[in-house]
Image (cartoon, rainbow, N blue to C red):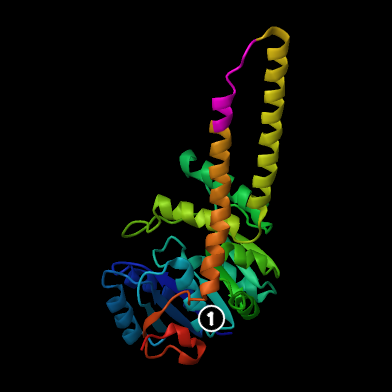
Amino acid sequence: MYLSLVVPCLNEEHGLQRFHDALVAALSGRVRDYEVILVDDGSTDRTLREARRLAAADPRVRYVSLSRNFGKEPAMLCGLRHALGDRVALLDADLQHPPELLRRMLPLLDSGYDQVVACRTRSGERGWRSLPARAYYRAARRFAGVRLPDGAGDFRVLSRRAVDAVLSLPEHHRFSKGLFAWIGFDTAYVAFRDAPRRSGGSKWTFGALVDHGIDGLTSFNAKPLRISLYLGALVACAAGAWIARAAAKAIVDGSRAPVGGTLLIGMGGLQLCFLGVLGEYLGRTYVETKRRPQYLVKELGPDVSAHRSRPAELVP
């Protein structure tokens, strides 16, 4: 069975050769027919030149270069659209997703599963990183309404029907971990420990992680809006009870409680919070109605199948 490996790349010029060597060693003797699709997500270094060199040296390597940095989600979507395999693997180029783990994942996929997901263990991880991450996954499971195990990331292997199901989803704002869980199908999980980064630094800034997290919490339903409604009603009831108590006390003993300023500050903060939640959904609706493509392609490698691309991908 033909295997496609989709690898988003952003400023990985110093790590692509190392990644290629590790991948070939991991698949040697286990997978005969495969392709590697390197998706250059608008890198500012010589990642594209390295991708061209690897494609020229190894006919199994193909590349797609985006016109600018669109983000990891559009880069993964681009790679999935160009993948031709009966099985498709998603993994990063920085070797924090160890290619040798594919030796455990592929047999599970071939045994009848449609998805095999690598879940990162948190052994050895510092508390200031693991606690917020665990809390976020717990909140995502509650708000998104899909099964999202702690540590589940983008590293996974998919069957062709799972890939086609993901590609059939038309939304612009994509939270792939949630979409992979939303499509369902039989899923197996494999635990692994993050390998140390061999070169470069993480491309995920704190702000980017926060934005990505908000995308995950608001991508699948309107539960945050419903929570705002409940919380607003609760605060209104509490404020009404406080005012009634203050009025009764003033009638009984003539005392006057300074409730006005406190109530104004509290209600004003809640209103701003609710407006922010509402604005998040309105902004998403605005972007979706434009129907812009998620990315644009600047350059296709000579061996990348053009019939898998869509017209909006190509720049004249």
Nearest to the observer: residue 77 or residue 254: 254
**Residue at 48% from the left image edge and 76% from the top image edge:** 292
Q: Relative to 286, does residue 230 appear above or below in the rendering?
A: above
Nearest to the observer: residue 64 or residue 23: 64
Q: Which percent across, then down, holds residue 161? A: 65, 79
Magenta stretch: residue 289 in it?
no
Magenta residues, start to end: 255-264
Residue 40, visible in the rendered structure:
yes
Determine whether, in the image, residue 239 is placed left or right of residue 73: right
In which quarter of the view is residue 254 placed? top right
Q: Which percent across, then down, holds residue 61? A: 40, 82
The mark total stands at: 1
Q: Relative to 314, does residue 88 appear above or below in the rendering?
A: above
Q: Secondary structure at mark 1?
A: strand
Magenta stretch: residue 260 in it?
yes
Q: Which percent across, then down, holds residue 157? A: 57, 71
**What residue type is disc 1 on?**
Leu
Name the residue beneath numbered marker 1: 3
Determine whether, in the image, residue 103 is placed left or right of residue 246: left
- Locate the N terminus by quadrant: bottom right
Q: Which percent across, then down, holds residue 210? A: 47, 51
Name of the residue lying farthest toward the top: 253
In which quarter of the view is residue 245 placed? top right
- Locate the C terminus by quadrant: bottom left
Nearest to the observer: residue 30 or residue 13: 13
For label 1, count other residues whose C-alpha is less than 10 Å away and answer few (under 14), some (14-19) or many (20+).
many
Q: Relative to 299, does residue 238 appear above or below in the rendering?
A: above
In which quarter of the view is residue 162 placed? bottom right
